[in-house]
Amino acid sequence: MRKLLTLLLVLTLTVFSSNIAVYAQDNADAQDTETTEAAEEQAPAEEEVEIAPAAVAEPVPSDIGGYQLLKKYFIDGSWQFMSFVLVCLIFGLAFAIERIITLNIATVNTDKLLARIDENLKSGDLDGAMEVCKSTQGPTASILYEGLKQAKSGPEAVEKAIVSYGSVQMGLLEKGLVWLSLFIALAPMLGFMGTVIGMIGAFDRIEAVGDISPTVVAGGIKVALLTTVFGLIVAIILQVFYNYIISKIDGIVNKMEDASIALVDILAANGIFKK
């Protein structure tokens, strides 16, 4: 599973980087065309009057797709710097998807599992009940298996085994969340850093030109705003996944606790502790 996610990450980065390179090359070609047109504008005034209507008649493309628009703003916001924000998004999504898949696999029907354990214990087959837990995936079945292993030692030993192994399973459920939290915090910080860098660039242009015209500071302010927006968007997306994962873990933990209590009651009802 981890190798598959790593491969998907590499493919995503490759495709996105190639698209950015192509788009950047198109922008460079467009700038060269604009430079050529600017040179041609130095022709006599009569020719300039004749060309003007054709220039006005050119339609401005307004039906640009969402992906192209996103890529345009990504490059306009200094893609060299915003690539770090993109890396936070990709790796954050990788950790989130891995946790979601793992937690979905770990989710089992505890009522059905307890019913199968109860059927084996009613017939006195403790080993059969342990085999049922061993063949079932998920932390709940693992905890019940550890409790059944200590069934002949009394209820105190069962509860102690369940609590001890439950803390281990809790750590496995929360594995990787610290990295997801890191990317959630890091994405807006990188965006704010881009804001500071963009404003510094704007003030440098003001100092060099000696004028506070909009055309002088617009570039730096645009970079500042775009990096902040992208950083906040990434943080919001990852935060939604983080909260979903936390709620999923809480649900699994509640089922684990309920199943543990029910197991002790089942063992007592079937007279396992008296043997």
Image (cartoon, rainbow, N blue to C red):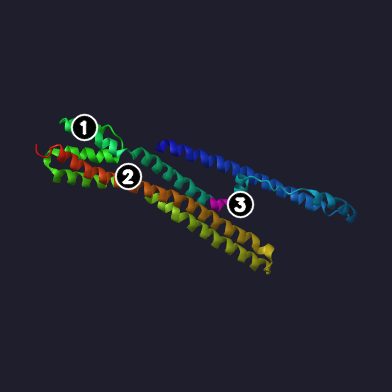
Tell me the element at label 2.
Answer: helix
Residue tagged 1: 119
In 3D space, how far apart are the residues under numbered discs 2 and 3 (Cα atoms)? 41 Å
**Residues tagged 2 and 1 counted as in contact (Cβ below 8 A):** no
Q: Nearer the viewer, residue 245 or 217?
A: 245
Badge 3 density bin: few <14, some 14–19, many ≥20, Cα 10 Å: some
For discs 2 and 3, the disc positioned in front in the rendered view: 2
x then y, percent, for residue 146: 21, 39
First reached walking from the N terminus: tag 2 or tag 1? 1
**Amino acid at dot 3:** Tyr
For discs 2 and 1, the disc positioned in front in the rendered view: 1
Residue tagged 2: 252
Residue depicted at x 61% and y 59%: 222
Q: Is residue 127 left or right of residue 38?
A: left
Q: Looking at the image, which residue sits at the far right?
A: 46
Question: Over which residues does the magenta segment extend?
Answer: 77-82
Q: Is residue 96 visible?
A: yes
The correct choice, above or below, for 246 with respect to 128 in the image is below
Residue depicted at x 19% and y 39%: 266
Q: Does the magenta-highlighted stretch encompass residue 228?
A: no
The correct choice, above or below, for 124 with respect to 13 in the image is above
**Amino acid at dot 2:** Ile
Residue tagged 3: 73
First reached walking from the N terminus: tag 1 or tag 3? 3
Q: Main secondary structure of the magenta part?
A: helix
Q: Looking at the image, which residue sits at the far left?
A: 275
x then y, percent, for residue 1: 40, 36
